[in-house]
């Protein structure tokens, strides 16, 4: 069964450093998303991406965040200057098309720890 | 801003019995609801969904019920199996076509005792 692949599985970074989280969505999917889950809290929407541009972003997704689909297969989330409160599980998800059935396919996540 | 609420943090049931997981929402614009299951160190896995035009959707051991007037949905698992032990998330969206961001609840930890 097709999978959404995320790398690395765990990233530790110093506060103020830039991090790039990588995702390879399912190849024929058209819509791409990033969500995050801070420990003990709910999964939160960050950003959606379609047709090579951001479709929607949440309040969390401020100027420190950016997304890119550089080569038609990878989908990356960049945090320019990490803060302690950015520590969370970051999930990438992809969706083929709105069909009214089924949900997104999520990756296994990247655990980001900012120290 | 808790638009999707899962008020019970945990549920424990005996193998073979029914598990009922509840979810409430406040945003009347939500018109599509999903349940996800999550194991540790894995991403959420889609289980079952329901559109607001229905009040029930069934898929094998899993049934989701939607009560729009009460803004309440529930997931029934019957019979429950030990492998069902996981965190279950309720999620909702406003179907606007190309983009349907999901709003999640905090999750319920289900433990199925052998």
Image (cartoon, rainbow, N blue to C red):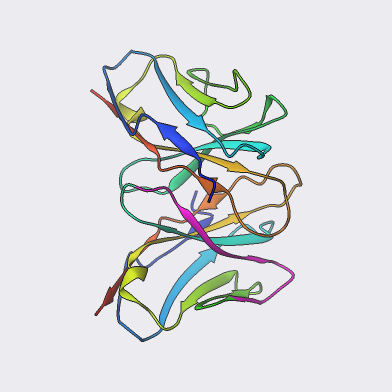
Q: Is residue A81 above or below residue B51?
A: above
Q: Position of residue B83 (x, y in %)?
A: 33, 69
Q: Pick the residue in front: B45 or B33.
A: B45
Q: Is residue A60 visible?
A: no
Q: Is residue B94 above or below residue A76?
A: below
- The extreme bottom residue here reads B17
Q: Pick the residue in front: B31 or A19.
A: A19
Q: Is residue A37 visible?
A: yes
Q: Residue at x 52, y 23 (%)?
A: A62
Q: Is residue B31 above or below residue B19?
A: above
Q: Position of residue A108 (x, y in %)?
A: 41, 43
Q: How many marks?
A: 0
Q: Is residue B22 left or right of residue B103?
A: left
Image quadrant in which the C terminus of chain B is located:
bottom left
- The question of residue B57 being in magenta is answered with yes
Instruction: Magenta stretch: give its range.
Output: B42-58
Q: Residue at x 49, y 78 (%)?
A: B61
Q: Residue at x 66, y 57 (%)?
A: B30
Q: Position of residue B43 (x, y in %)?
A: 42, 48
Q: Position of residue A59 (x, y in %)?
A: 54, 32
- The question of residue B54 being in magenta is answered with yes
Q: Is residue B32 left or right of residue A15?
A: right
- Residue B56 sits in quarter: bottom right
């Amino acid at each position: 069964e097709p999978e959404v692949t995320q790398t690395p599985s765990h990233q530790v970074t110093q506060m103020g450093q830039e991090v790039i989280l990588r995702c390879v969505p399912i190849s024929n999917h058209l819509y791409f998303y990033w969500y995050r889950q801070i420990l003990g809290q709910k999964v939160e929407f960050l950003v959606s991406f379609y047709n090579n541009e951001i479709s929607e972003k949440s309040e969390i997704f401020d100027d420190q965040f950016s997304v890119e689909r550089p080569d038609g297969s990878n989908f990356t989330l960049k945090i320019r200057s990490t803060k302690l409160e950015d520590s969370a599980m970051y999930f990438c998800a992809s969706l083929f098309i709105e069909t009214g059935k089924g949900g997104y396919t999520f990756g296994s996540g990247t655990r980001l720890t900012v120290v | 801003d808790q638009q999707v609420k899962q008020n019970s943090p945990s549920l424990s049931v005996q193998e073979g019995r029914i598990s009922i997981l509840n979810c409430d929402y406040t945003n009347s614009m939500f018109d599509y609801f999903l349940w996800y299951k999550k194991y540790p160190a894995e991403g959420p896995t889609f289980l079952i969904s329901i559109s607001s035009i229905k009040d029930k959707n069934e898929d094998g051991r899993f049934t989701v019920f939607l009560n729009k007037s009460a803004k309440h949905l529930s997931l029934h698992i019957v019979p429950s199996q030990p492998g069902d032990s996981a965190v279950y998330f309720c999620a909702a969206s406003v179907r606007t076509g190309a983009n349907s961001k999901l709003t999640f609840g905090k999750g319920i930890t289900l433990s199925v005792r052998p």
